[in-house]
Amino acid sequence: ASPKYRLMKADIDHPGIDSWTEVIPEGENVMSSAAIIDGKLVLTYNQDCSQHAYVYTLDGKQMHEVELPTLGTVWFSGDKDEKEVFYGFSSFTFPSCIYKYDIDNNKSELYMAPKVDFKSDDYLTEQIFFTSKDGSKIPMFITYKRGLNLRGNNPVLIYGYGGFNISLNPSFSTMRIPFLENGGIYAQVNLRGGGEYGEDWHQAGTKMNKQDVFDDFIAAAEYFINENYTNPQKVAIMGGSNGGLLVGACVN
C-alpha cells in the first residue's frame, strides 16, 4: 500500500504485479502526475495543497526541481523522444501562463501570457491552517486585496469540495476579480475527503467519516468570524457537484 503513491516499472511481456520494480519510492508528499519527456521523468507532487515539479532520470535519480513563479498549479507537455518542453502554471493571483522549459539546464522562459486587466501585485494569497471540530488541522488559501481593513465586516466567499480523492490546488478565475476588487475575501478550503494528502486524507472524509468534511467547512467559516475578518451576515459558501452536497448539508 502506498497512500501517497510511488512510481513502478513493469515488463510489457510480463506485466503481472509480481514483476513490478520500484523506480520512485513513496515520499512525504503526494505524487500527483508523472510523464516521460525528452528521455527523463517529470513528476509533480502536492506539497501542502500546491504543486512542486521535479526532473528525474529514468532510473529514478533526481536531477533538479523546477523553479516555479510562486505557489500554484503546474502541468507539463512534451514528447518522450523530443527536447521541446512546455508547462502551464497558474495561481489565485497569477493568470494561466505557458512557459518554455529547458529541461537539461533547468531554465524557464515565458512563452505565452493572457491579457487580463488585473494587477496581481495588488493582491495577496496566504495559506493558513485552522483547527476543525475534532482537533484536525485543515489548510485553507485566502486571497484578498493588499491593505484590506480587516475589521469584521468584509464579505467572505468560501469554496470547498472535500470528496472523491480530488485535490483543490491554486487556480485563477476572472469571475473572482470583481469580488476581490471590491473588497471581498476569497477562500479555498482543502477539506478532508480530497486527495491533497493522499489516500488516508481521502478516507478521512468518506462514508462514516463524512460528517468530518462538513465540520471542516463549518470550522473554516468560524475561523473568519473568530479572527475578525467578517461576521455571520457576510459569509457565503460555494461548491459544485459533491461540493454542492457539501453546501446543502452545511446550510441545513
Image: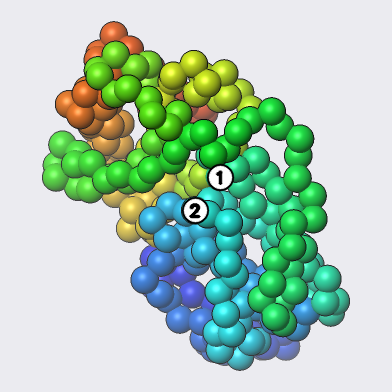
Q: Is residue 245 visible?
A: no
Disc 2 packing (10 Å; few <14; some 14–19; many ≥20): many
Instruction: Give the side of residue 201 with respect to residue 31, left or right.
Output: left
Q: Amino acid at mark 2?
A: Leu
* Mark 2, secondary structure of its residue: loop
**Relative side of 193 to 242, left or right:** left
Q: What's under tag 1, amino acid-wise?
A: Ser
Q: Residue at x 44, y 38 (%)?
A: 124
Q: Quadrant of residue 193?
A: top left
The x, y position of residue 171, in whole percent, is: 56, 41
Residue underneath mark 2:
71
Please name the residue shown 52% across and 54% down the image: 70
* Residue 213 horizontal/vertical position (percent): 30, 37
Quadrant of the image for the C terminus? top left
Residue 76 visible in the snapshot: yes
Closer to us: 124 or 133? 124
The disc label shown at residue 243, or none? none
Residue 114: x and y, percent?
Answer: 76, 39
Q: Is residue 57 left or right of residue 80?
A: left
- The reply to whether callout 2 and callout 1 are in contact (CB within 8 Å) is yes
Res 59 quadrant in image = bottom right
Give 90 or 46, whichever is nearer the viewer: 90
Q: Residue furthest top?
A: 233
In-front residue for pair 54/118: 118
Q: Mark 2 vs mark 1: which is more N-terminal?
A: 2
Across and down, in percent, residue 236 comes to: 38, 17
SS for tag 1? strand
Distance between mark 2 and mark 1 Cα atoms: 7 Å
Query: In the displayed structure, does residue 47 sit left or right of residue 222?
Result: right
The numbered disc on residue 91 is 1
**Quarter of the figure with the N terminus:** bottom left
